[in-house]
Image (tube, coloured by chain):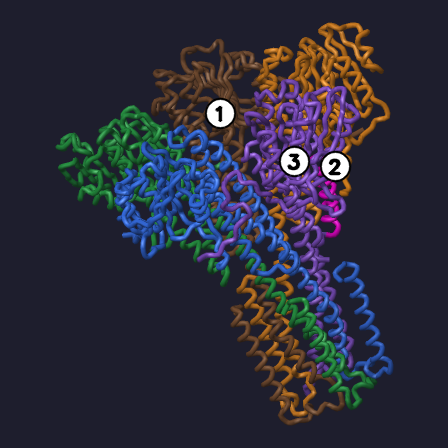
Chain colours: A blue, B green, C brown, D purple, E orange
Amino acid sequence: MKKRRESKTFGLPPGALVYVGGHKTEKVNINLLQYSNENFDAKTIKEISEYSELPGKNMISWFNIDGLHNIDIIEKTGKTFGINPLVLEDILNTSQRPKYEEHDNFLYFVMKMLDYDLEKGEMTSEQVSLILEGNVLLSFQEYPGDIFEPVRNRIRSSLGRIRRSKGDYLMYTLLDTVVDRYFSILEITGERIEKIEDKLLDDPSREVVQEIYSIKRELLEMRHAVWPLREALNSAKRTDSSYISAEIKPFLNDLYDHIIQVIDTVETYREMVAGMMDLYLSSVSNKMNEVMKVLTIIATLFIPLTFIAGVYGMNFRYMPELDWKWSYPGIWIIMIVIFVILLSWFRRKKWL
Amino acid sequence: MKKRRESKTFGLPPGALVYVGGHKTEKVNINLLQYSNENFDAKTIKEISEYSELPGKNMISWFNIDGLHNIDIIEKTGKTFGINPLVLEDILNTSQRPKYEEHDNFLYFVMKMLDYDLEKGEMTSEQVSLILEGNVLLSFQEYPGDIFEPVRNRIRSSLGRIRRSKGDYLMYTLLDTVVDRYFSILEITGERIEKIEDKLLDDPSREVVQEIYSIKRELLEMRHAVWPLREALNSAKRTDSSYISAEIKPFLNDLYDHIIQVIDTVETYREMVAGMMDLYLSSVSNKMNEVMKVLTIIATLFIPLTFIAGVYGMNFRYMPELDWKWSYPGIWIIMIVIFVILLSWFRRKKWL
Amino acid sequence: MKKRRESKTFGLPPGALVYVGGHKTEKVNINLLQYSNENFDAKTIKEISEYSELPGKNMISWFNIDGLHNIDIIEKTGKTFGINPLVLEDILNTSQRPKYEEHDNFLYFVMKMLDYDLEKGEMTSEQVSLILEGNVLLSFQEYPGDIFEPVRNRIRSSLGRIRRSKGDYLMYTLLDTVVDRYFSILEITGERIEKIEDKLLDDPSREVVQEIYSIKRELLEMRHAVWPLREALNSAKRTDSSYISAEIKPFLNDLYDHIIQVIDTVETYREMVAGMMDLYLSSVSNKMNEVMKVLTIIATLFIPLTFIAGVYGMNFRYMPELDWKWSYPGIWIIMIVIFVILLSWFRRKKWL
Amino acid sequence: MKKRRESKTFGLPPGALVYVGGHKTEKVNINLLQYSNENFDAKTIKEISEYSELPGKNMISWFNIDGLHNIDIIEKTGKTFGINPLVLEDILNTSQRPKYEEHDNFLYFVMKMLDYDLEKGEMTSEQVSLILEGNVLLSFQEYPGDIFEPVRNRIRSSLGRIRRSKGDYLMYTLLDTVVDRYFSILEITGERIEKIEDKLLDDPSREVVQEIYSIKRELLEMRHAVWPLREALNSAKRTDSSYISAEIKPFLNDLYDHIIQVIDTVETYREMVAGMMDLYLSSVSNKMNEVMKVLTIIATLFIPLTFIAGVYGMNFRYMPELDWKWSYPGIWIIMIVIFVILLSWFRRKKWL
Amino acid sequence: MKKRRESKTFGLPPGALVYVGGHKTEKVNINLLQYSNENFDAKTIKEISEYSELPGKNMISWFNIDGLHNIDIIEKTGKTFGINPLVLEDILNTSQRPKYEEHDNFLYFVMKMLDYDLEKGEMTSEQVSLILEGNVLLSFQEYPGDIFEPVRNRIRSSLGRIRRSKGDYLMYTLLDTVVDRYFSILEITGERIEKIEDKLLDDPSREVVQEIYSIKRELLEMRHAVWPLREALNSAKRTDSSYISAEIKPFLNDLYDHIIQVIDTVETYREMVAGMMDLYLSSVSNKMNEVMKVLTIIATLFIPLTFIAGVYGMNFRYMPELDWKWSYPGIWIIMIVIFVILLSWFRRKKWL
């Protein structure tokens, strides 16, 4: 009988809810932000089912749920808003591919929120799911703390048109914020690439390869996040769902242009990084070549001379040269001549 | 006259039944599982033709046939259920490409059931063919023992909606189980890749290359299994065959998303593995460089000094230095000076 | 004035018949096989124009022409069956790309018949052209001896449905035989690849690279033969020519699946072979590394010791150590200590 | 709490105007060129709002704005001509991808104006945005000084058909000038590639790799500029906007052909540069091989001889050879014989 | 102010005629060939405008213009036959991409006429433009001397159907001749590749890399010439222009097949050449490995022995071994034993 290793979800019926991510916050936070052109309200709620009792249903309501490990909450949310179990399964499966789905009663967007942790010097990735039901927007995140603070500020201080717009504009704003962050990360990546280029020409060390490799991996991950998002946005901007109004379309078009620009940059960086690996290998070869040359020059200069010295160190009784008066200075002259000839040969070969 | 080597099937008329796989179980097992919302029955049958006498024709019947080498049984099965000889040929040809075909009286699905043998540390592959005729499902496997046990359990204990659904849902469930297993295997592959990455930076040995190469091959095989399955699922979810009911379509869509995710991961891993090969080669170059440096430093330090010692080991009668009082300590000083100069030169070159 | 080299066909008007292949059989053989459900007849004929006098016109007639260098015969055949001169030109041009063409009065199929010469250990390629005019099938080959013997046997012994079918089934059977042979060749290639893999890990020699390269070339040639055939079959199976009856379509579909499987395998092998080249290069690097290490260890161990011995081989008159009683054993101890230190340093560096 | 680095535009509402480029001219220049078949006028204006008071509205007006950092001017321009804020944002975002957009009241073209700075020996890139509203054309550039001088001269001296044509022809002329400049740059790149090829065969130095790498990067950048422009032109030439008249279409077709030619050349150069990197690596390997050979020859020739000399330098009391008369010349003969044998062995191995 | 380098055409209005090629024949030759089924006439004319006075307008007239530097002649030709200035610009721009254009009063074909200069051993490329206006065909070439001589002969001696056909057949014949020449060049390339393969296995020298690289470049150039021609032919064979009659279509189809075959071969050769570069690099590595082994064996054999000899060459007064009777032969035995052990160790390592 073969031994097997099962993944967390193997063998479960479809629609069964399991959180596959590793992170568990102590507590799942549900933040509710409600606003209209005139009013604004922010609170933390405990149960999503409190929603039915909340006032201000004609306001725009943004539920932000941090933490996916409490399946009970997710399930209740699903029941309250009538979300398909297959979609709930996708929300919990944090290795989901970015996509956009239209259901009868809601729109569903899932994507990767990338960020750069400057302290650890590495990119972080988190799955964000958005569900839009008219003026109710649900956002699901894996970890507390996000990049949406500026959006909240804009709502709070009524900056731009956000307070005058509907739920679809809020959804667009969140998407836009995620995509904007991609640009920030690409900027950092661009700077890292430039630093590596300088290092490659100065002093190509082992660390450089590791850095190249780590950038390569991050770009691969970005690509993974960005390409499917392009498809998703393309479907969204061509939709005729009533949840996305006509005046949002130009914004989605703009966003689509941005994502294409991100893709372009990612691909360009990928090519540059590939080229840098070649550059590195060629510079390692060059260094090895240089080391070899030093060895060869030294060995080639001294080995013949040592041989000559060895010859006249032999103890044969009948070696006439040993008794000649000018032997010793003569040998020095011969050795110097050999030395000079070899040296000039190396110079002609451009090794010196 | 040229000598030729014929494959097992060469020159046979189309539709001729030959099992091309290598495995032969002692006996071909036919398991029959019959269930409806209320009833459940599992038995092992000897002859597929017994089927006509079996009670419970309005139940869902799942015939599972383990072992393909008994062509007689396959042929009888074909006759009993009216399966096209070309399809039977495909079932036996275990190097079949995954595909989906609609015939007048049945649907035909063939795919690869991948598994990971933890003991041998290698991926195993087995061909599974599914034939759906209304509420009768036939599954053909090469070896006894499969990954469908959880499905049987779900049927037995009436978990999820499986007992309330038709034959198409059963077929979907089996497909889903196969695709779910792909995720488990990718998880294992992901862990192997991470281990290799760590090793590559610590101590790149010959075993690492072999491991990289074997992962490369397994990914190639997975790709081979997964890409055509995507096409097959795409046709299945767009079908208008009456055997696939409308309520199954969302499940097939979900499955299609999963297979795309598998493809994405396979391609990402392939790129990562390709990058790791580069990393390995660069680290071998680095090690060689380091070895060269040690050799060069030692040789460059001592060869000139050995030459000097050789000179004063010569036996010329007229060597004035030999008789000077301070010659010997003087030579030591000269040698130490040369040693120090070379050492600092190496340090300036950053070889030390 | 520039010198030029002209190819055999340069400057000729289109439709001019020139055989560009290298092979010339002594005599062109024309074999005629005639059969219907009841009758069977095989003979060798001298002139294609004899055909008009032959009995059994309502039987299926298969003319097989071995050897293309006798342009006279080809031309007469063309006239007898009303074949377009441009098609005749294609039949003779043995570097033709596989293709399928429908003409008013006939169908034209050209493809590569690949075979594997076990004695020479190399793949052979031959162009086969098929022309189907109702129940008359013409096949043109470059060399005598082919892979169609099993087909002739099946006709002779009335195996399968071939005797009950029309000319289109005969054409399909020949196509199927050619494609089946591709599988045999891929099987051989697969075995060669496995052998190389074993060798690569044991003892990567120069012959392995040549073998890899030769497989690479053969796969390239197969690809050349197979990809266009896929297109050709695709057109054939979608045709609405009256020469291809509806009952042949499933067989063509099946054949199309086979050719896709061939393509898949060819591409997979190509990737594996590419990966093997990397493996080889990395193993050569490893071997070089090992050689370097041996050299470095030996040189590094002995060069300093030789230097010490050299110092005490100098002939200075005033060398106090020379006269001390314990100098000689002391020097041995010093040298052994140095030796052991270096050895343990290498061990720490994991070079030993 | 993670630290973050924000890009200039992160978190801003869409349509917010921020100039992301680095360059700031002291003053933003607005040049206005007005012409018709009979009249011509050129002036520098301070405020775009002066425009409403300017005479000659039925003339063609070309506003050229150098410098994008003065957001106030851009904003006023936008208001005066009714330009969408999202478009204004794109004009300021100088990492924009080339594109073509049709709006209700204007056409928008954004592309990269490449140039080659011969002094610094590097390619420069600048974003140019064109907005066409009937006979009014707005062009936005980042830096003062451009490549449009010949166009201005042609207008001034009424060369060609430009004075007889409408605003769309002016726009086409500017596009054409930008694309023409691409050819000049490719010509320079072609010459640099040829120089590198010569160097690679003569004396492959480290500088060559850097040069190859820098050309690679520039080609990558050109590609980035050129591929999307192709799409943009394709949309433009298929438009049915009333701003682009039918007689301009052949010119746009011609321009499209040119851009395809640019793309072809860029891709060809990219392949050539990739091939050159291989050539470089192979020539470095060759040089290393040559260095190794010299070392090996010298060491192999002298090490055995030095050993022989060492043997007869030993001080054993009982060494009969030392007292023989012909020992010394005999040893010389033996050494010369060994030397000659090794030499001829190297020659047979083709190392000499 | 940046310095710039302008290309010959930069800044000129579209349709301005400039010859960008380098070659200038002393005199531009215009050859006129006129023929019908009965008549044939060939002459050299000075002015294209003489044409209006020439007799035989109902004959087919082929004007062949050698040399593009005399813009005056091109301009007059353009005026005489009503050719669009943009087309004239393309004729003169010899870095034109092959293409096919239909204009109201004529068809325009531009392509590359490749040839192989056997003396210089390199491929030459020349731009050929064809303009067809009913029964008048204009061909423009850069240099005198072309590959069309066989066509002229066929016309002169009324070989094939050319004299019975119209102008479109003449155009097809010229296209066919150009494409046929591609086959000749590919044949030469194929032979060069085979020669390199043999050399690579025998004796991979530096010249081989240069040869590989030069073939690579030529194939790149061919590709550049052939891919767009495929598109052009595709448009031509699908045209419904009245200038191309229905009976020419099968010939164009045939030509299209040929060009696809050329493309296939070019791509195959490109892959083979890429594989050969790998083979070369691996064989250089192998040679280096072999060199290293020789060095290591020699050094490893003699360095320890030389050390031993060095030890007994020391001049310590108290070295008991020096006075023993059997020391000297004993040392020889020890050294021979070490030698043999090392040798057998190398043999076990398969270095010998």
Chain bearing tag 1 is C
Secondary element at tag 1: helix
Marks 3 and 1 in Cβ contact (< 8 Å) = no
Secondary element at tag 3: strand
Look at label 1 and name its amino acid: Ala
Start-end of magenta stretch: D182-203
Q: Which residue is mark 1?
A: C232
Q: Name the residue at 69% across, 10% down.
A: E134
* Residue sitting nearer the eye, E158 or A152: A152
Look at label 3 and name its amino acid: Phe
Where E270 sits versus D136, above or below? below
* In-image side of C5 versus A183 (left or right): right
Q: Which residue is mark 2?
A: E121
Question: Picture coordinates of residue E132 (x, y %)?
Answer: 69, 15
Q: What main secondary structure does the magenta stretch of the protein show?
A: helix
* In-image side of A238 versus C317 (left or right): left
